[in-house]
Image: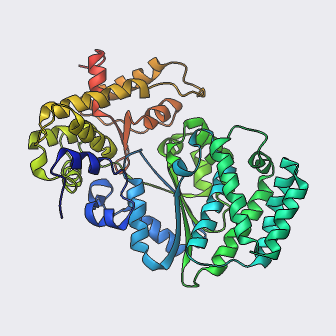
Amino acid sequence: MNKALTLRDIRRVCGLGPLLTAEELDKYWVDTDPARTPNSSLRNRVRRTLEDKNDARILVYGHGGSGKSTELAKLIQELGGDYFPVRFSIRDEMNPVAIQAEDVMLVLTERLLAETEKGGFCLGDDVLRPIYDYFATVTRKVEQGRDASMGVSAEASASTGFFVPLVKLMAKFKSEIKLNAHSEETVVATLRKRPADLLEQINGVVRAVRQRIPREKRLLIVVEDLDKLGIACAHRVFIDNGNLLAAIVADVIYTVPIFTLHSPDAGVLRSLFRPFGLAMIKTFESDGRPAPGFDVVKKIILARIDEKAVDPGALDLLVRKTGGVLQHAFEVLRNAALMDSATLPLKEKEIVEALKVKRSEFWSEIALPIEPVPGVASVEQLYDRLTGYAKRQLAGERNPPQVDAINQILLRACALVEYNGDRWYGVHPLVIDNLKELGRVG
């Protein structure tokens, strides 16, 4: 297998993001389970839950950049032909800033219909007609175009049936969600006001698809990148309206922000879903000694980049300073390979400069959210918490989990890294460097 051995190829492979295709998985995937939570693989836990329960509602949580999307892609690959997977990212399909649970349900339905059409499965008009009529009626009322809507309905029943017109309606709703999420004058805004009716129609589509796909296959829906939501938005989607997402009559996996499992409302999630965490790869112990994950992260990097392309000392520095956050490691490598002075092999000076760029990003990321969070009034509170944790960490002590709003903000920024297998917090190494610069820690 050819690995990256030019600056251009390094930039390309480091910019891939999650490994989503079979080709990418075959070329670059590395088994990280031993460095995360030995004997408790995320994929195995999810697979067993699917085997044990029909219509399983599963949450997968973990830090941004920890490898959740790659692990879910590997899971789908391992499940093989036993499932009919429908997988999508809300970042591709929606406006993540203004997302609501009802919007997730509508886009889920649009993606389900699109994948069904792609798979060549025909859904019967006897099932689709009442569903189409419901959405067409709401559309007609909102747009005040009764004659035009009736024409569409008549055309549908006389020619192509109701599948294609329903697909077009759902595509229109998705466009409204993406481009006019804040508007109260759209059809989607009207649909949100009657969530029970919306759920009934969407489950009608889900049941129709389940009836039409081959009997030996189970429908599996995977909704990704919901873990990128802000604190207030995640609360609205998963706490206030999680019952809607949990009521989809299929096996569904949602990614969820790690900080939602560190809130006083986490019990709501556990009552509706089965949450499974993807532990961060632990590259160092609480006392600073290298952990087995240190070499695993190096192996992941060297699966993409030829070992001749980076000096060993530069690679060790990269792994040590990015704290097991894979996304950060690849961002730093890509930035190093973008520098005017970069030559092969990449040396410590390029890695140091690229790490400075990542360090500077934490200054803006450790900030108060746009929407106020009760109990957090100043950035000083965030840095006070980080300082206390960092001092204990540098003294070789562990920082046990603490459920409050301050830690939710810090977890979202990845300034705090939770090593889930051992249930302790580590301050990100680059944040510790910033705290040293501020004179808060020695």
User: What is the x, y in percent for residue 208?
Assistant: 69, 75
Task: Identify the residue at horizontal 65%, vertical 52% (top origin).
Answer: 174
Task: Identify the residue at horizontal 64%, vertical 67% (top origin).
Answer: 113
Q: Is residue 59 left or right of residue 352?
A: right
**Residue 167 sits in which quadrant?**
bottom right
In the image, residue 315 above or below residue 54: above
**Quadrant where the image shows the N terminus:** bottom left
Task: Identify the residue at horizontal 71%, vertical 71% (top origin).
Answer: 163
Q: Nearer the viewer, residue 297 or 116?
A: 116
User: What is the x, y in percent for residue 393?
Assistant: 28, 32
In the image, residue 103 above or below residue 75: above
Q: Is residue 327 left or right of residue 366?
A: left
User: What is the x, y in percent for residue 205?
Assistant: 70, 69
Q: Nearer the viewer, residue 169 or 350?
A: 169
**Quadrant where the image shows the C terminus:** top left
Residue 30 in view of the camera: no
In the image, residue 168 above or below residue 118: above
In the image, residue 379 above or below residue 96: above
Count of numbered labels shown in the rendering: 0
Task: Identify the residue at horizontal 44%, vertical 24% (top origin).
Answer: 382
Residue 344 in view of the camera: yes
**Residue 417 sits in which quadrant?**
top left
